[in-house]
Amino acid sequence: MQVYKTFLKIAKAKLPSSIVYLCVFLVLTIIMSATAAEDTASKFEVSSVDICMIDKDQSTASQALCDYLTKYHTPVTLDSYDSETLQDNLYYQRISYVLMVPEGFEEELLAGHEPKVQTSKRADSASGYFVDQQIESYLRALSLYVTGGSSITDAVKQADDAFQSAPEITSLQFDKKSGDTDKGMYYFFQYLPYVLVMMLLEGLSPVLIAFRQKDLAARINCSALHTHAKNMQIGLGCITYSLGNWLLFAIISVILYQPSQIFSRNGLLCLLNSLVFTLIATALTLLVSSFSMNDNALNMVANVIGLGMSFLCGIFVPQWYLGDAVISASRFLPAYWYVRINNMLSGFSDEALSMDTYRMCIGVEVLFLAAIFAVYLAINRQREKTSLA
Amino acid sequence: MSTPVVRIENLVKRYKELLALDHFNLEINEGEVFGLLGPNGSGKTTTINCLLSLLSYDKGTIEIFGREMKPDSYELKRQIGVVMQNVAVFEELTVYENIDYFCGLYVKDKNLRRQYVQDAIDFVGLKDFTKFHPKKLSGGLLRRLNIACGIAHKPKLIILDEPTVAVDPQSRNKILEGIVKLNEEGATIIYTSHYMEEVEQICTRIAIMDKGRNIAIGTKEELKKMIKKSEIITIELVDLPETDLAAIRQLPHIYQADFTDHKLVILCNGGKHNLVRVLNYLQERELSVGHVYSELPTLNDVFLEITGKELRDM
C-alpha cells in the first residue's frame, strides 16, 4: 500500500487550501441558519403592513375591499393623498402599500368585469406582493359571486365568509411545508455542492496531478509495482479522501442541527443526496486532473466549475429566480438535480415532496456520475496509448 | 560465455515520419559501466525508454537478464533501477519519504527497506538533509536525491539517463564517483550522456549513437584506434619556412601538418615518439620553439571523424 500511503501524505500536505473553503462554508452556513431561524417571525409581520387606502368610489364593494384588508393590515391616514405625498411616505417607510379604488369600481363589477384598482408599493417590499395577491384573490371571488347572480351585498357577504374560512395567512408560508425541521439544515445542504466541488478540486486534484507528472509516472511505471495495484491504490486514495470529506460534513451537520433532524427521514434523504453528489464531485476531480496543469490554472478551473455550477444551478441564487433559459441549461449539470431535491425536501420551492421525484433526481445524478467517469476512463486510456507510442 | 545483462536486437522505433531507432543492436555484459554517447536527439533516451517498456517499438527484441522485457515483466523490473534525465520526486514529501516511497515500490519488507533507505542516504551523502523538502535542496543535492530514489532498492542493473545535466562540477564529480562505486559493488550500469569527458572517465565500454544507429562500439581505446588520428601535436614557432613544413610532412606517421598564426599543428596516425621526432627536426634546423602540446584524440574526435560533425554542436 505504498502508493496509497503516499497519496494520503500528499493529500495531507495539500489540506490547507481545502480548509479555507471549509471555514468559509461554515461561516456562511451558520449565518444563513441564524437568519433562517428568525424567518418565521418576520414572515408573520409581512402579512400585516401599513396600508394607505383611498376609496374614490365610496360604494359597498369598495368599502368591502377596504374592510377586508383592514382585517389583516394596519390602515394609515395621511393629511394629503396627492401623488408626491404618497411617494414620500412610501420612500420613508411610513407606509408600505397604497391602494386607490377608482370611481366606477362597483359599476365595473356589476357589468361582469373584474374591476381594476391602482396600487403602489416599495420596490423591495416582499409584503407588498403578498397584499397584491390578497387583493387579487378577493376581487376575483367578488367578481365570481356577482357573475353567479348574487347582489353586491350578498356577494360581499359570501366573499367575506369564504375568506374567513380560508386558511390562516401564516399557513400559506412555504417554510411550513416540510414539517417542523429547521431550515438551517437545508441551507447547509444547499451550499454543500459548492464547497464539495471546491475542496475536492483544490485538495484532491493536486495529488492526482502529482502522480500523473510525466517523469514521476514513468518512474512508477518502470518499477516492480503492478499497474493494476497502482491504479487500485490511487482509486482507494480518491475514495478515502472524498468519503472523508463527506463524513466530515455529515458530522458537522449532526453537531450543528442535532441528530434528531439529521437522522429524520428528510435529513437522511439530504445525506444520501449529498453522498451521491460527493461521488460526482470526485469523478469531476478525476476528469479535471487528467489535464496536467499548474496550481494557478487548477485554481482558475476550480473556480469556473464551482462558481459557475453554483450560480447556474440555484445554489447561490434560488432556482425560481433564474430565467427559463438558465434553468433549461442547468438541467445538463448535476448540481441542478441536487438542488432540486434539496428545494423539494426543504419546501424552498413549490414542488411537493414526492419519493418518485426524489428517485428520479438521484437517478439523473447517478447517470451524470457514470457519464463523467466514462469520459475520464476514455481520456485516460487514450493517454496511456499515446504515452506508449 | 555468460548471458548478457541486456541484449537489444534490430530495434526499430518510429515517431510518425521520424526514424528514432534504426535497426539498433546492443549487448551489455554483467559488471560493465556501459556508456551510450551521442548528441541530443541521437536516440539515447528512446533506447532507454524502450528498454524499460515505457515506449512501444515497431520491430526488434529486447532481453534483460536473458528474458524478454515486456510492460508486465515485474520480476525483471524489480532488478532494475532507473535514474531519469529530469528529477522525478514528490515535492510534498521529504528527502527520506521520497527515497522510502520509491524503495517501497520494490521492497515490501519494512525493516529491510529502512536499512536500504539509510544506505541510499549515506551513499549519496544526504544524511543532513533527510527532513528537507526537495524545494529546499540545491540543484546538485536534488540530483543526488534523484539518484538515491533510483538505486535505493539495490538493483543489479542501473540505468542512468543523463544524470548530471545542469549540475555543478563538484556535484558532478560526486555523482560520477558514486556510479563507479555502485559498479564496484556489483551493479551493471548503463550510462547515457552527451558529455564525452564523463563517459571517458567512468565507462568501461562505449557505444556512440547517431540518428538512431550504433555507429561505433568498444572500449575508449578501441574507439580511438578506429580513427586515423592518434595524436595531435601543437608547437608555437616564430616562423616556419615552407620547405621545413614540407619536410615535417614527410616524417613517419604524420599525415597532416599546417602552420598558421605561428602555430604548427601536426596530426599523427599511430607510431611512437612522434613529438620527439618533430622537435629533433626543428632543433636541427635551429628554429626556436615556444609552447609545445601533445594531445591524444578524444571521443569527440572519433565522432567527428565518423560522422563529420561535432558531438557538442548537436
Image (cartoon, grey):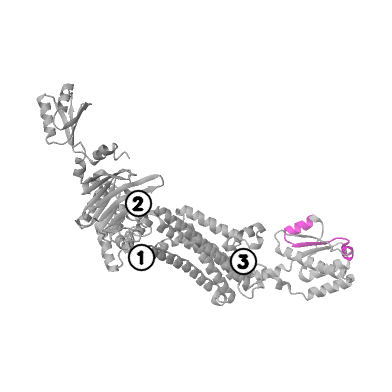
Residue B179 pos. (x, y %)? 24, 53
Find residue A2 and name its label: 1
Count of all numbered marks drawn on residues in the image:
3
Find residue B231 and name its label: none
Q: Quadrant of residue A355?
A: bottom right
How dense is the environment of label 2, judged by Cα within 10 Å: few (below 14), some, or many (20 and up)? some
- Spatial separation of the CA atoms under disc 3 and disc 1: 42 Å
- Seen from the viewer's position, the closer of residues A211 and A373 is A373
Residue A330 pos. (x, y %)? 61, 60
Residue for badge 2? B59
Residue for badge 3? A340
- Spatial separation of the CA atoms under disc 2 and disc 3: 58 Å
Residue A95 is a magenta residue: yes
| Residue drawn 83% across the image and 68% down it | A65
Q: Quadrant of the N terminus of chain B?
A: bottom left
Q: Which contiguous range is marked in magenta?
A: A84-110
Three-letter amino acid code of the residue under disc 2: Lys
Are discs 1 and 2 both within one chain? no
Residue A346, above or below B238: below
SS type, badge 2:
strand
- Lateral position of residue A90 relative to residue A178, left or right: right
**What's the chain of the residue with tag 2?**
B
**What's the chain of the residue with tag 1?**
A
- Seen from the viewer's position, the closer of residues B216 and B77 is B216
Residue B255 appears anywhere in the view: yes
Residue B230, above or below A100: above
SS type, badge 1:
helix
- Lateral position of residue A128 relative to residue A369, left or right: right
